[in-house]
Image (tube, rainbow, N blue to C red):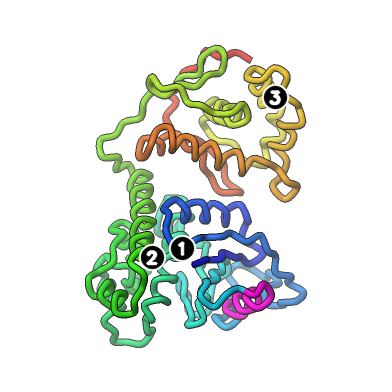
Amino acid sequence: MKVYLIKTPEYEIENLEEVEELLNSFQGPMEFIAENYEFNPEQFPFLEQISEETPLSWSELFFLCDFYRKTFQIGKSDFIILLTKRRNSFNFFSIFNENKNAFVQTSGWELFTQANSKFPIAYEVVANVLRCLMKLHLSFPNDWIHIQPLGCMNDFCGNKKEIILKLRTGDICNDCLAKMKKENIDDQIINQSLGIFEVIRDQLLFKQGFTRNINPKSIHVNKDGKIFIGNKMINLNPLESTLFIFFLKHNEGIMLNDLQSHKKELLAIYRKLRPAGEESSIDELIKPYYQGGTFSVNKTRLNKKLKEELGEPLANFYYLNGNRGEAFKINISPDYISFDIRY
Ligand SMILES: [Zn+2]
């Protein structure tokens, strides 16, 4: 089963891809695919941006899903989930319809959590797929929509702050599980969903300082630019190492738009690791994404290798993360970092 993630024009493709990456961190029958497709506001005048505050109606949002489904002949069993910064007419976080379409609002999460908004957004993507498959009715009263929050995926969250509870539990209550069985949802889909919820919960708890007594290990860059975390050497290619060392040096974080002004330093690190390295590799690294810049790809690969080499939760200390428009950084305290490298 495929779940296509599409977006309205104001939501950044890089952030869409971050959500996709997170969703694909637990394997199963659902395959999440971020689509780099731009709706043309001339064709859909309601997309002309007046302000993010101007709500779109549910029918406008579902119309975009249907348009995409028809245009690209998406199968009836596959889902289309539209991610949008725009508010919607009933001020919901997200909603689905019976045609396996859904939308998720990507803005405003900072009111409820300090963690990166990709966590609640990814959660809502999965929750809408399950709600649709379990044929949840949106009428009240209803055994599967909990007005009083239980820490279940289907807590109604009339008070939007209650959303944090279900993100923290990552759970589905017995009544809702029974309804899912009754509707013959594949066990593997439920299992994958709970697996994704758990990844989200663990990373959220980690961000809030609940590290289950895991402390970071010190990180050392030797004079040749080899990177050690504890006693373990981390195997990265020269570009990944360049990014990692650069962001360890710039512990305060760097905005992507400012990478250009650090080109000299990036090139110096890169040539230390790879003396015959082409300047063009660094040019491509710092180019904006829409011009084919490779920052995003390299950052994703770097984080993936850290996860493979260190495992979670330890790897969380060393990930390079950020949203476009904000600084990207590695969150580990500089007290744990030491360098012998000179460049
Ligand atoms: Zn429930």
Q: Is residue 151 above or below residue 269?
A: below
Q: CA distance from mark 3 to mark 2?
A: 45 Å
Q: In this figure, which residue is indicated by the disc labeled 3?
A: 267
Indicate yes or no whether the magenta region holds residue 271: no
Residue type at mark 3: give it.
Leu
Label 2 neighbour load within 10 Å: few <14, some 14-19, many 20+: some
Q: Which residues are magenta?
A: 61-73
Tell me, yes or no, whether the two marked residues, 3 and 2, touch with CB atoms within 8 Å: no
Q: Which mark is residue 189?
A: 2
The answer to whether any part of residue 32 appears in the image is: yes
Q: Which mark is residue 30?
A: 1
Q: Please report the residue visible at 41 percent of the width from the left and 22 percent of the height from the top.
A: 232
Viewed as shown, does residue 279 lie left or right of 300?
Answer: right
Quarter of the picture for ligand 1? bottom left
Viewed as shown, does residue 257 lie left or right of 87?
Answer: right
The C terminus lies in which quarter of the figure? top right
Per the image, label 3 sits on a secondary structure element best described as: helix
Tell me, yes or no, whether the two marked residues, 2 and 1, touch with CB atoms within 8 Å: yes
Q: Is residue 31 above or below residue 320?
A: below
Residue 113 placed where, x, y %? 40, 55
Per the image, label 1 sits on a secondary structure element best described as: loop
Residue 62 placed where, x, y %? 57, 79
3 or 1: tag closer to the N-terminus:
1
